[in-house]
């Protein structure tokens, strides 16, 4: 072997050596006989370096996995002998191999097993067992090989094939694996089970590592072998014995879990679980001590969960089968485990608690199905409820300022508890409501002296009731009187207690979330609105010391104001005055750290807009307020734009452009308040927004930071087209002219939707403007599309594809809005050029989305111009170009009917042909029959069939014919 290259296998080798080693590995993989050198090195222990040994196994693995069938009988025999020789050497070596080498060797053994067991090596396991006997090193390898075999046969986490051929390979592999397992069950599983028993018996007291490995093997295989081989007295007694041995009990737990998890007859399953429970209980394992080893208790909790769910599955089957006596016995067995379940659920370690939630959830599902609950069952429900309430509580260690992995896990755990709470509500809504009310009232009475986590959870429970006790449209305060009264009392307590001032972010946020969730409360008791508004506006909310609280509150405040609508009337001007400083545009140079980020300010501007528009003021007053809101933005904008024009430093330019963009965005956001009922015109605000337009449009001619500025102004124009309607039209021509100056693919792609919006909305009103800018826009598009790009530049290719789509979408909008004269009036040469681009789009580019659009354009043009009175020469164009396009496009190799978009393109192609027939009548059929189709060497009977389908009155018939 290339010793120099092998030096690169060491993790500490420098990059050049490592590169050389990788190249050498690739070379050996391709080589015909390099694997033999590696096999020899392994069989004769030529190398002592671990990385070289691992490397040799990798080469061998590649050979077995991908090139085994190319080997001769003798070579295949050599690989088998190499592995057995290596295995024999393991028992004589003074030191065991490193774990990573043993695992890799086991993988190679397993690959060989999968390949050879059914044909050439039926004695695979017996050969290995005869070599290893009970030698600890040999047993270790034997168990690793068994785990690797199980992973190949069962473990679906292992993806063995590339994604493309994944599913077909999967079915082949599944069939092969089934055959391997069936053969193993017949030929060797009983012997393997016997070997496991011997290993466990031999090593349980003197080699915990091997014992645990063996238990892992039993747990893995139990899912697909005959359960009676394991679930019998001698095995179970041994496993139960291991439950009392500290170093073995975690693996024993997992092993018992797999046994319990195995599908079997419901009555037998109940007997099995009950017999296990008796022994575990008499061993004292059912009394949980908080001090116990948490790792073991997490596994034990999973086992108890498995037993509980297994019994519930049995109960469900027995009920279904109508065996009420056995079902009752099983239910008693389930009830007997609830006390243990509760001990685990309430455990302070969340992993232990989380592992038992499945059993708890399923148990509640049973209770939900019973017609009446016994006193004990009611007590169980209450105990689960109290446990959930306790476990929802944050602990002291939770880091609110810098949430990491532990915090994320607790958030997930809380979601599981929420599901339990929802299920509790289905079993006993009255009990849940009463329990939450009790906890809530007790806590809020003394919130000043109560720890933050208890206050937070009390409010959180009230918040969670909204989903746990569902109603339509949040109508929690009408209907069921008991429930409405209880929720109303709690909400009143929440908003009058002063708890919003609690000095902890979690409590503050929970307060605001709950207030917004129960916004309908303020329709019933509007007297509390000022208190809550003040909480939002002062140091509790938008002026809180925590940026996280300020940010979330900005969003919640906007929701709160929107939901209250008319009830905000008395407070509008006061609120607008109080939020004024929060809306200041903070320019980059003043170094002042604004309270809210620009994203948060968007919500405040939207809120201000909503307050003004929804108010009961006159249109004049609304206009004054809106002008007060937007004038500071316009003034700042003018100043900043001048500064940008003079700025030299690029960072400063970027900061100023961002700030200008924010100003446009804020003005745009205020317009979200208008609706069909409250239009800009009705509110008397048109003039203010037209002033904004006049202020913002000059930014389009700024040569610096074009992309940022154009994007902001373009978005504002989109909004104004909706809000100002035709009043916006005078601004469009100059805006378009600026946006078309030295623009790139992306600019055009984003500009075209604006023109489409104007065209679709105003139609003939904008016809003169469209006729004027049609060719300049097309020239700009063609110029960008014709720019040379590097062959491998994927992003440039994608940008061009998107621009091409946008261009065709523009033509579709123009033709679809009844404005084909815009194209017709461009002069014969230009019209022809445009038509050819559409033909090209339909046929030449393998982009089904664009092709579909092109056929829609063509059929529209045929419909408009294809009759006897159409433009001169268009009928010729139809026969020379449009008809051939309808045949050439589907005949392209890239036209893939397995793709949904392509099917749609074909459908539009069919519509185009139908439209041609509709407009040209028998002449079209004659052309197809006598000229065009014969020129393609189409058989006469197929031509006949095609023309018949085309003449069918039902368009679907022809579409389906074309598909076939």
Image (cartoon, rainbow, N blue to C red):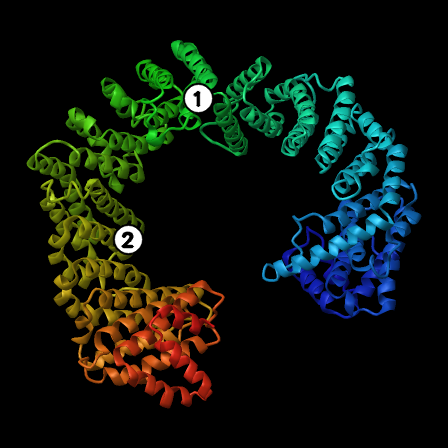
Q: Which mark is residue 708?
A: 2
Give percent across and percent down for residue 843.
39, 76
Toward the left, the furthest residue is 620
Secondary structure under tag 1 reads helix
Vertical order, 962 against 151 (above or below)? below
The residue that label 1 is drawn on is 461
Q: How many marks?
A: 2
Q: Toward the viewer: 701 or 680?
A: 680
Q: Toward the viewer: 872 or 14?
A: 872
Secondary structure under tag 2 reads helix
Give percent across and percent down for residue 399.
49, 27
Vertical order, 54 against 279 (above or below)? below
Give percent across and percent down for residue 536.
28, 25
Quadrant in which residue 224 is drawn: top right
**Which of label 1 and label 2 is nearer to you?**
1
Q: Toward the viewer: 874 or 942?
A: 942
**Is residue 533 visible from the viewing direction of this image?**
no
Q: Classify the position of the N terminus by image quarter.
A: bottom right
Q: CA distance from mark 1 to mark 2?
A: 45 Å
Q: Residue at x 47, y 65 (%)?
A: 899
Crowding near the residue tagged with mark 2, few <14, some 14–19, many ≥20 C-alpha atoms within 10 Å: some
Task: Answer left or right for 543 relative to 387.
Answer: left
Give percent across and percent down for residue 908.
36, 69
Toward the front, the furthest residue is 322
Task: Answer left or right for 43 relative to 262.
Answer: right
């Amino acid at each position: 072997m290339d010793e120099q290259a092998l030096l690169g296998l060491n993790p500490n080798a420098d990059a050049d050596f490592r590169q050389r080693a990788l190249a050498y590995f690739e070379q050996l993989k391709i080589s015909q006989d390099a694997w033999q050198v590696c096999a020899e090195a392994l069989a004769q222990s030529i190398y002592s370096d671990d990385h070289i040994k691992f490397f040799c196994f990798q080469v061998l693995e590649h050979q077995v996995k991908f090139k085994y069938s190319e080997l001769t009988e003798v070579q295949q025999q050599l690989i088998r002998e190499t592995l057995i020789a290596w295995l024999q050497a393991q028992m004589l070596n003074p030191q065991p191999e490193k774990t990573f080498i043993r695992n890799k060797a086991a993988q190679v053994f397993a690959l060989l097993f999968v390949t050879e067991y059914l044909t050439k090596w039926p004695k695979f396991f017996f050969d290995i067992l005869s070599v290893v006997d009970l030698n600890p090193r040999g047993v270790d390898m034997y168990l690793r090989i068994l785990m690797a075999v199980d992973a190949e046969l069962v473990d679906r986490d292992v993806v063995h094939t590339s994604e493309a051929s994944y599913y077909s390979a999967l079915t082949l592999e599944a069939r092969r694996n089934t055959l391997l397992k069936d053969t193993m069950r017949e030929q060797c599983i009983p012997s393997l089970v016997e070997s496991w028993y011997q290993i466990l018996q031999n090593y349980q007291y003197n080699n915990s590592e091997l014992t645990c490995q063996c238990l892992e093997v039993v747990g893995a295989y139990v899912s697909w072998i005959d359960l009676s081989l394991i679930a019998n007295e001698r095995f179970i007694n041994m496993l139960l014995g291991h439950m009392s041995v500290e170093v073995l009990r975690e693996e024993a737990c997992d092993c018992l879990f797999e046994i319990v998890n195995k599908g079997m007859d419901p009555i037998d399953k109940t007997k099995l679980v009950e017999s296990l429970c008796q022994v575990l209980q008499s061993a004292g394992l059912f009394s949980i001590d908080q001090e116990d080893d948490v790792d073991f208790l997490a596994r034990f909790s999973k086992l108890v969960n498995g037993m509980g769910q297994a019994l519930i599955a049995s109960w469900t089957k027995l009920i279904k089968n109508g065996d009420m006596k056995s079902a009752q016995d099983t239910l008693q067995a389930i009830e007997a485990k609830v006390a243990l379940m509760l001990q685990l659920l309430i455990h302070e370690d969340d992993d232990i608690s989380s592992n038992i939630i499945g059993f708890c959830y399923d148990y509640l599902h049973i209770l939900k199905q019973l017609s009446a609950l016994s006193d004990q069952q009611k007590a169980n429900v209450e105990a689960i409820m109290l446990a959930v309430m306790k476990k929802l509580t944050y602990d002291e260690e939770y880091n609110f300022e810098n949430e990491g992995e532990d915090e994320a896990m607790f958030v997930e755990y809380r979601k599981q508890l929420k599901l339990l709470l929802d299920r509790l509500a289905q079993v006993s809504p009255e009990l849940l409501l009463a329990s939450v009310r009790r906890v809530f009232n007790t806590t809020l009475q003394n919130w000043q002296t109560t720890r933050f986590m208890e206050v937070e959870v009390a409010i959180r429970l009230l918040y969670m009731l909204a989903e746990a006790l569902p109603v339509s449209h949040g109508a929690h305060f009408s209907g069921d009187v008991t429930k409405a009264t209880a929720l109303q009392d709690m909400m009143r307590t929440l908003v009058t207690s002063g708890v919003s001032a609690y000095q902890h972010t979690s409590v503050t946020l929970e307060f605001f979330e709950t207030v917004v969730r129960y916004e309908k409360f303020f329709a019933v008791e509007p007297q509390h609105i000022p208190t809550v508004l003040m909480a939002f506006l002062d140091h509790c909310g938008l002026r809180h010391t925590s940026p996280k609280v300020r940010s979330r509150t900005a969003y919640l405040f906007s929701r709160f104001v929107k939901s209250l609508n008319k009830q905000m009337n008395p407070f509008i001007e006061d609120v607008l005055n109080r939020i004024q400083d929060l809306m200041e545009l903070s320019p980059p140079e003043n170094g002042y750290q604004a309270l809210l980020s620009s994203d948060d300010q968007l919500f405040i501007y939207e809120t201000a807009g909503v307050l003004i528009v929804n108010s009961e003021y006159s249109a004049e007053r609304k206009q004054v307020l809106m002008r007060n809101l937007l004038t500071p933005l316009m003034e700042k904008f003018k100043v900043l734009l001048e500064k940008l024009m003079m700025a030299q430093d690029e960072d400063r330019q970027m900061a100023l452009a961002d700030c200008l963009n924010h100003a446009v965005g804020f003005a745009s956001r205020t317009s979200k308040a208008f609706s069909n009922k409250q239009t800009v015109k009705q509110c008397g605000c048109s003039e203010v927004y037209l002033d904004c337009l006049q202020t913002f449009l000059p930014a389009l001619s700024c040569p610096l930071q074009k992309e940022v500025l154009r994007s902001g102004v373009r978005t504002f124009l989109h909004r104004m087209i909706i809000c100002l309607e035709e009043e916006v039209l005078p601004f469009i021509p100059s805006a378009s002219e600026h946006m078309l100056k030295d623009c790139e693919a992306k600019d055009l792609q984003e500009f075209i939707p604006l023109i489409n919006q104007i065209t679709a909305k105003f139609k003939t009103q904008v016809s003169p403007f469209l006729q004027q800018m049609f060719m300049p826009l097309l020239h700009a598009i063609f110029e960008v599309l014709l720019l040379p790009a590097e062959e491998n530049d994927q992003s440039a290719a994608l940008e061009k594809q998107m621009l091409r789509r946008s261009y065709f979408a523009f033509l579709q909008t123009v033709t679809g809005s009844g404005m084909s004269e815009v194209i017709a009036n461009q002069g014969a040469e230009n019209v022809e050029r445009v038509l050819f681009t559409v033909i090209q789009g339909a046929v030449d580019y393998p982009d089904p989305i664009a092709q579909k659009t092109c056929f829609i354009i063509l059929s529209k043009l045929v419909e408009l111009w294809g009759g006897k009175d159409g433009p001169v020469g268009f009928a010729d164009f139809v026969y020379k170009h449009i008809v051939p396009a309808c045949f050439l496009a589907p005949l392209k190799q890239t036209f893939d009917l397995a793709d949904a978009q392509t099917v749609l393109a074909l459908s539009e192609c069919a519509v185009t042909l139908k439209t041609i027939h509709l407009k040209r009548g028998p002449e079209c059929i004659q052309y197809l029959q006598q000229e065009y189709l014969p020129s393609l060497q189409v058989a006469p009977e197929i031509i006949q069939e095609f023309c018949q389908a085309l003449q069918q009155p039902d368009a679907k018939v022809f579409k389906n014919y074309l598909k076939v």
